[in-house]
Amino acid sequence: MASTQRVTREQQRRRRTRSGVLLSTDTIIDCALRLSHEHGPDALSVRRLGAALGCDPSAIYRYFHNTDDLLLAIADRLVGRAIEGFQPGDDWMAGLREMAHRIRDNYQAQPRVAVLVASRVTRRENEFRAVETGVSLLLQAGFDARTAVQHYHAFIDTVLGHAALDVATLTLPKDKYEADAQAWTNAYQALPAETHPAIAAVRHELPRMAGSSFDNAVDLMISAIAAQAPATKARPSRAIRAAARASRKSK
């Protein structure tokens, strides 16, 4: 507890480095994102950050407990960018689809760090808002609490997994990226029907495998969820109303 309080107090005190940079949590996160975008995840070290910010590396620990704490803050920043201004309407399926694309597009803007953070739980405000939004959309569809959480879990893991896979290809060296893409046109087309009859039967479609499956995966996931959805209600679902009543009683 004392350690958490110390970091919180330090976060509130903006300090200038010897190079004149006004040090703060946001400044450090901005610098970390820039370094990782330019040099890859290995740039996320207190030594590199200190050099870039013009401060002693130990100064970073006044704002973050350790480098993993910083990584989680970076992850939450990406989540925040993805959901900034997101106001889903009455169509819960459209809301989930927009949420998915916002996440993927934001990850593509920071591919090198996105691969690192896709599997993390930030435990911070932006992630809380994202989960609140996603679960609310599924409660809006009429699912009970347990099913809403199960479907949100499957949905967000599908989105993050495919988004991470997409951005991972963006970080490949150009020659390797092109070789992988060409494999569907070259290596697979040459396989004989005698040994690979299924591949031979669809060989004219295999070049599609060089592209992203993100849109198709998201559409399949949302369609599967919709197939199980009760009739969508215009008013808040029973689970949302129950949570609201419990909250009012606790005040």
Image (cartoon, helix red, strand yellow):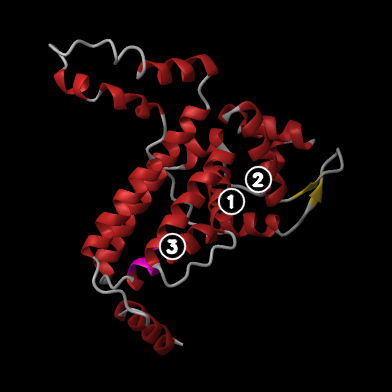
Residue 29 is marked as 2
Name the residue tied to disc 1.
77
Of the pair 178 and 176, the residue shown nearer to us: 178
Q: In the rendered view, tell whether residue 171 sits above or below residue 187.
A: below
Residue 88 located left or right of residue 37 = left
Mark 2 is surrounded, within 10 Å at the Cα level, by few (under 14), some (14 to 19) or many (20 or more) other residues, namely some
Tag 3: amino acid: Gly
Q: Position of residue 73 (x, y in %)?
A: 57, 49
Name the residue tied to disc 3.
95
Spatial CA span between label 3 and label 1 = 21 Å
Q: Earlier in the sequence, mark 2 or mark 1?
A: 2
Q: Main secondary structure of the magenta part?
A: helix
Q: On the image, which quarter does residue 182 sit in?
A: top left
Q: In the rendered view, tell whether residue 223 sits above or below residue 206.
A: below
Residue at image location 54% in from the left, 39% down from the top: 108
**Residue interval drawn in magenta:** 134-138
